[in-house]
Image (cartoon, rainbow, N blue to C red):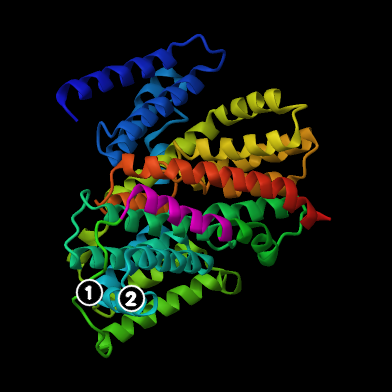
Amino acid sequence: MNTKTRFLLTVFAVIVFFGTLYSPLEIAPLQKVVLAVLFLSMILWFSELVPLHITAFIAAFLLIAVGGFFGGKEIFTPKEVFIPFFDPVIMLLLGGFVLALGLQKHGLDKVMTFFLLKKVGHKPKKFLFGLMCLAAFLSFWMSNTASTAILLPIAIVVLASNKLKPLDSNFGKAMVLGIAFAATIGGIGTVIGSPPNAMALSYLQDEGIAFGFTDWMMYGLPLVILLLPIAWFILMKFFHPEIHSIKSDFSFEPLNKQQKVVLLIFGITVLAWLTTKVHGLTSATVALIPIILLYAFGLLETKDINKVSWSALILFGGGLTLGKAIQTVGLDEVFAGVMFEYLFGQPLLLIIAALAVFAVIFTLVASNTAAAAISIPLVIPLAKGLGFPVEIAVMIIAIGVSLDFIVPIGTPPSTIAYSSGYIRTSDMAKSGIFIALIGIALLSLLAYFVWPLLLA
């Protein structure tokens, strides 16, 4: 980006911020503050005028400084604004990062690559599809964040072995995005896959609606099966591989003692994630297990922690902060009121599509977890007012917030993919927007034609 473009974008961002802040909109002053910060963050995230994690800091600073000036000193205190930067979801991300570090440091990523190449072959398109299927499957049984953090090093090993450089390689972009997108799609399939899923289940139970693990799979799995090959096809169209065969300069050797211990820790972590209902620990708490054990057994050193993508964690924390701010000042209720006004009396299919679009748009400026936390409580009374089944409305939002493949802030897998250095925001957006639109269409059709049959 040249100096002139940066200057024009900066001027535009400042105008939008102050224009929103002093606009004639009939909302409370603090709501204008949050809306202004929201719009500014959107511009900075899309344009990459500054690094994405710096935008998260800018948003936090403006909420405290400008929010305090407009009477929000007791609401936007430093403590309240910075708490989301160490949210349990951040700990889940950190655990996934450290687990991936352990696998990578001890060469287990290469072992996984060897077996995958052996099973699916050396053709780039087949290898990518195999890797995406593996990412989706892992995300059924663990956080999509963890599966992305585990599989991304495999992609990087393959790319490095084939001398494909970051930002310049089409296949590199397809590999990194494919893993992230597949993990996000796979996370839709079960309650465990993504935090919004568990959140939705909790809200349904609070409403007295019985909804279990298998119920979720009946709703979510068909979308996974349909969307995964579509995502692969779109990535292949946008990023046609520049190589015809994947070369591997490594071969399988018997596992050494350290590799076996890392695999054991990996197995313990996965088992603990799968059995959270049995032992009562949250997924975020379980994420501490690999951190503690890998260091306790000397499998990682203090210097290894510096390799964690702290910028990705800061970025995700900024998304959570914005989501909480929207909820705190009641801007979410304003959005809900506008939605009710426009949706009341409309055809059912249009209402379903509108909810799905709303969920995806929300995740353009906040993480899917934050978007779900804000949107699900809104959609329950909205559904009741519209005479719409609460289960379907909640599921549309819970799944819809995981259909943002457009910006890095949307989901943790997208954040991790961006942190790899192999893609630009524009790379994610140009392919992701088509996958998101198709995902919205498929979600809407399933919710309209299939899901009501499950309630019968």
Kindly indicate whether the residue at mark 1 contacts the one at mark 2 (C-beta within 8 angstroms). yes
Disc 2 to disc 1, how far (Cα)?
9 Å
For the point 46% across and 66% down, the residue is 133
Q: Is residue 393 magenta?
A: no
**Mark 2: secondary structure:** helix
Quarter holding the N terminus? top left
Q: Residue at x 59, y 55 (%)?
A: 197
Residue where numbered disc 1 is placed = 248
**Mark identifier at residue 117:** 2
Please say if 14 is above or below 444. Answer: above
Q: Is residue 252 left or right of residue 4?
A: right
Q: Quadrant of residue 41?
A: top left
Judge the density around disc 2: few (<14), some (14-19), many (≥20) Cα neighbours within 10 Å: many
Q: Residue at x 27, y 64 (%)?
A: 244
In the image, the segment drawn in magenta is: 225-240
Relative to residue 194, is residue 117 drawn left or right? left
x, y percentage for residue 115?
A: 34, 80
